[in-house]
Amino acid sequence: MIGKSHLSHLGVLCLLSSLLNGDENVEYFSACSGGEYATVKRLVAEQPELVHSTTNDGEHCLHLIAISGNADIAKLLLSQGADANVRSKWENGLRMHPLSWSTYYGRYDLITLLLESGADVNADFDIGRTESGTAEAATALDVIEQILVTLDDEGDEKERFLRTRNALVKAVQCSETIFGGQSLLHIAGWFIKFSQALQP
């Protein structure tokens, strides 16, 4: 199983890889991971295509902002059409999506924004390998349950992860309520995107 500290190292490795691989958008991805809203906003205004760009290893800014937890960057990118379900394509990236990164960091505000923007709460990702070498998959809710078991019973960190768990449980319950073949959560995500598109 990959732990919270492993994810932190994954974010650092992603940035180092971008630097070493000559990623042309290093300033943008560094600002994403560092939570530098003003820099991200300026760069997106100058180059709107950055909203959909990924590092050479396939990590999107929505992945990287889990490091800093800057919800304003998430709002900006999602309002510009960023995909809340974008997957990493790096070989060691574990098929992770922004919801999974934010779960490992206990980023309740980011998780709420991602879910409101259509992130699939039931999307799995790899958390490691079994003894036979096959990928072991889990959802964000599976992972948060494992994290909570390892935390002390008191403190801000436990509270943050409990809030994160509650948001995920609520989203799972909503996704299980089927309406016309689509989950209510999926329909809500489409409605939000549609209403954003109508705004001038």
Image: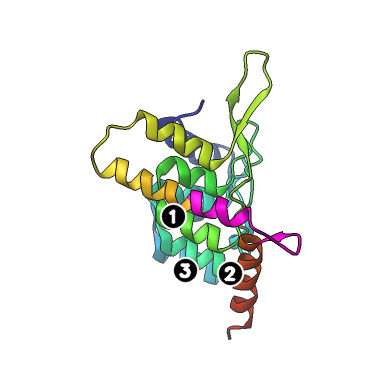
Q: Specify the amino acid type for callout 1.
A: Ala
* Picture layout, residue 64 above or below residue 16: below
Pick whichever of labels 3 and 2 is earlier in the sequence: 3
Along the polypeptide, which appears first: circle 2 or circle 1?
1
Is 53 one of the magenta-colored residues?
no
Mark linked to residue 190: none
Residue at x 44%, y 46% (from the top left corner): 165
* Residue drawn at x 53%, y 58% as measured from the top left: 114
Report, in whole angstroms, how far the alpha carbon at label 3 lies from the one at label 2. 13 Å
Q: Is residue 187 left or right of residue 151?
A: right
Q: Amino acid at mark 3?
A: Arg
Could you tell me residue 179's position as x and y percent?
70, 63
Q: Which residue has dot 2 on it?
A: 80
Mark 1 is surrounded, within 10 Å at the Cα level, by few (under 14), some (14 to 19) or many (20 or more) other residues, namely: many
For residue 152, say whether it is visible. yes
The three-letter amino acid code for the residue at tag 2 is Gln
Which secondary structure, mark 2?
Answer: loop
**What range is drawn magenta here?**
168-183
| SS assignment at label 3 | helix
Res. 42 mark: 3
Please name the residue that numbered disc 1 is placed on.
31
Name the colour scheme: rainbow
Residue 178 lies in the magenta-colored region: yes
Q: Give the position of the C terminus as an image quadrant.
A: bottom right
Instruction: Residue 64 in the image: state x and y as whole percent.
Output: 49, 48
Identity of the residue furthest to the right in this view: 181
CA gap between label 2 and label 1 equals 17 Å
Residue 18 occupies which quadrant of the picture?
top right
